[in-house]
Image (cartoon, helix red, strand yellow):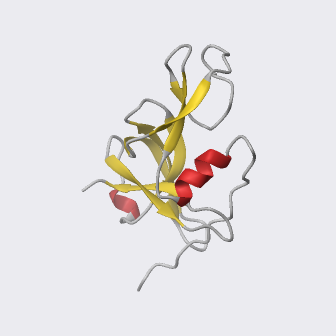
Amino acid sequence: MAQAQRKIPAPAVTPETKPFWDAAADGRLVIKQCTACGQSHHYPRTICPFCGSDATEWRPASGRGKVYTYSVMRRVPEPYVIAYVTLEEGPMMMTNIVDCDLDSVRIGQAVRVVFKPSEGGPPVPMFAPAP
């Protein structure tokens, strides 16, 4: 029996996060990097959480990462995996692991970004097992 598709609510797009969602609509993952201290960070915000500088800019991300931790949400109509993925560039993203058997997800597993449609908003970056 095919698993039902979980509906993804449209994310709140603000002026601060609009470039992130615009890139997602183009199938690209971008993250912020501070030009003062060189650290990359996620979630999208103007001020660097490491040094407090407002000298941040959008940079393309590889879309590759590893599962840091995860939990399978089963007590819902359509079960899903919620996870933290450590991106190759360093920041960690809270996300979903998709396009796989829920019981096959493992800590340290290599994953790649995929973009899933939301209800009336931009696509949302999620991660699937890397080939």
Q: Is residue 24 above or below residue 66?
A: below
Q: Is residue 2 left or right of residue 50?
A: left
Residue at the spot 68% in from the left edge and 63% down from the top edge = 10
User: For the point 52% across and 37% down, which residue is it?
Assistant: 31
Asked which quadrant contains residue 69, the reply is top left
Q: Is residue 72 visible?
A: no
Closer to us: 59 or 91:
59
Instruction: Give coordinates of residue 44: x percent, y percent.
Output: 63, 38
* Residue 94 horizontal/vertical position (percent): 55, 44
**Looking at the image, residue 120 lies above or below residue 70:** below
Judge left or right: residue 41 versus residue 90. Answer: right
Question: Most extreme residue toward the left, as rendered?
Answer: 131
Residue in front for this viewpoint, 17 or 110: 17
Q: Nearer the viewer, residue 10 or 6?
A: 10
Answer above or below: position of 81 versus 59. Answer: below
- Classify residue 32 by image quadrant: top right
Residue 128 showing in the rendered view: yes
Residue at 60%, 26% in the rendered image: 56
The percent position of residue 6, horizontal first and vertical second, equals 57, 71
Left or right of 44, for residue 90: left
Labels in figure, total? 0
| Viewport quadrant of the C terminus | bottom left
Quarter holding the N terminus? bottom left
Residue drawn at x 57%, y 30% is: 57
Residue farthest along the bottom direction in this orientation: 1
Q: Position of residue 40 (x, y in %)?
A: 51, 27
